[in-house]
Image (tube, rainbow, N blue to C red):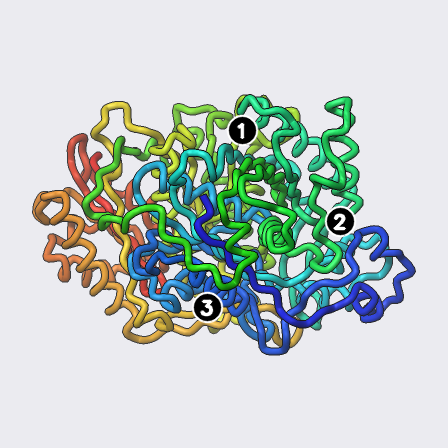
Amino acid sequence: MIESLGVYLPSRVLSTQEVLDGCRTPLRFPLERFTGIRSRRAVEDGQYSIDLAIEATSRCLARSARDPAEIGLLICCNISRLDGPMTFSYEPSTSAKLRERFGLRQALSFDVTNGCAGMFTAIAVVDAFLKAGVIDSGLVVSGEHITHLTRTAQLEIDGFMDPRMACLTLGDAGAALLLGRSTDGNSGFHALDLYTLGRYGEYCLAHATDREHGGAIMHTDSLRLHAVTVNEAILHAMDVLAGLGARPDACQHLIMHQTSEKTLSDAVTEINRRYRRTVCHPGNVVYNLAERGNTATTSHFIALHDKASSGRVRTGDNVLFSVTGSGLTVGTAVYTLDDLPDRLRDPGAPPRPSGAPAPAPSATRRPRRRVRIESVGMSPDGGSADRRALGLARLAADECLRESGYHRSRIELLLYAGVYREQYLSEPALAALVAGALEINDSVESDRARRTFAFDVCNGSLGFLNACHVAATMIEAGKAETAMVLAAEIENNLEVRPEALLGVREVASALILDAASDGHTGFGQFLFRAHPQHLAARTIEARHHGGRSYLHIHQDGDLEDHYLSGLTEVTEEVLDRDGVKADELCAVLAPQRSPEFLRRLAEALDVSPERVVNTCADGLDLYTSSLPYGFRGARERGLARPGDVGLVLGAGAGVQVGGALYWF
């Protein structure tokens, strides 16, 4: 359930007419009448995505009595990470920054990306962590500064049929949700289901522009996207309501993703046609576009906040959320409100008491069932003619599927943890594009009984281990039976700034995870720790200069010292928790940064260097592919035999580290 909701809207009002007047090419198109958008909020000078997220989080926490130090999970899900002038942040993650800012000392933190379905994707992850007993509360945050896309589009659009027109409908906003278990058995989410149809992933693409003026741009095939989205979203909502045994009029409010008035009205018409009676009408359909525009991931909760604050949404009401986002991601959620609307209407209301006790330290919990690595795949050794992250990821996934006992249609969860990709793509999730390229339950014609949910998990070089944790928890919670986790990295600076490279090997890797049938093989409990005092030890941002986008890389000379210190501490904690001694480890699967780093790690852990798997002989960092390479390396070198236990470690910007034991 939603314990607390915080919303922030910047004060500057930008009218649709001002947007049109700012276009380099005059547009004679009734944009306001077509979309229903009269104005939207836009950031002030000096305000960016991170500022919107901070404001929303502050308001959310102020409405809860829960101590921030009790919160067990923090997920940021904004599409835009424009955190400075023409500066798009990659490392550290937004969640790492907010974790430090608000003192969320116990919170596991990472970002997810899934287009405009990002907030509900994060809610689904929190739900799994709650069901599995990993946490007692989770915070979901999004700060969407997206009107910078509008500014780019104003320079580029050459007519009203231009695929960049949707950029003129966007508005800025921040939203934050504090989630916990329902305490009364009635309020909260009764259903939350999401899936991805990757065949349509290219219908909406946001990435860096190739024009000299720089910035980001979004291309949308609005007609085809509209045709698929409306039909699929309605069918899914009908299925979910039928599964709950609920009548179509059981929900007092329908909140759809707020894109344009025409899209919402077409959906209403089609719903009524399907039910052969008036189910949807102005009294129960929320239109929130007039003064907000399309606020991307935050749109459903901006609408909920607005309508609750005005008194239209009340305690005890049922809300049906229809979720759509690039990818194409489709979803439905059914929610019953507690007294949240009353608290939103009364600024002086006391903070809501937390619905559950403070969480026990994660080290005391054991997984209910172990999740194992079923198969491994990699892009071909020696490089590939395809230098795209998408192309490399497909090669790795294909090999992983060939090695697997599962048909591709059995992959129910697909998580992508790679960071660096062509065109600095920010939407859709690369996971969705991979699912489409692999034809994994990717179209409206696919068997409706088999669906795949795809999204990106982003946390620098630690992201792959985070993604394995997410996948294992969702399997443990019964959200999926099988998951594929994959990643690819490319050198964005190779052609534009070859003197300033990341130093990563351009490869891709993939794992398929499932529940171990023997109850013994697989991951033990994951453990993550953050060292926010070193938050700025590694920062990577995409910038633009001279007509080219490039990565600006800053890394402290003692970064590896911080990693080694953190990995030593997390290793001691993992081993102590499970009663395993260092000399019992068959192998250590560590970040494959360099042979020298691995030598120093063996020394710090006081284990034999031969047991620290080294697959980076060329000196290039395997980065997000370290775990798959380490796992295969341990097997090929005879270090790991059935029944042996190894140690899996990860480290990334933040400084954040993680570890888990793995029983082979």
Q: In terms of secondary structure, where does tag 2 sit?
A: loop
| Residue 494 can be seen in this image | no
Pair 3/1: label in front: 1
CA gap, disc 2 to disc 3?
35 Å
Residue at the far right in the pictured view: 28
CA gap, disc 1 to disc 2?
28 Å
Q: Residue at x 40, y 55 (%)?
A: 74
Please name the residue that numbered disc 3 is placed on. Answer: 540
Above or below: residue 621 compared with residue 336: below
Mark 2: few/some/many CA within 10 Å (<14, 14-19, 20+): many
Q: In terms of secondary structure, where does tag 3 sit?
A: strand
Query: Which of the 4 quarters of the picture holds residue 402?
Result: top left
Please tell me which residue lies in front, 335 or 589: 335
- Quadrant location of the N terminus in the rendered image: top left
- Quadrant location of the C terminus in the rendered image: top left
Please name the residue that numbered disc 2 is placed on. Answer: 260
Tag 2–tag 3 contact (CB < 8 Å): no
Q: Give left or right: position of 569 versus 533.
A: left
Give the tally of numbered discs: 3
Q: In terms of secondary structure, where does tag 1 sit?
A: loop
Above or below: residue 466 compared with residue 558: above
| Residue 620 can be seen in this image | yes
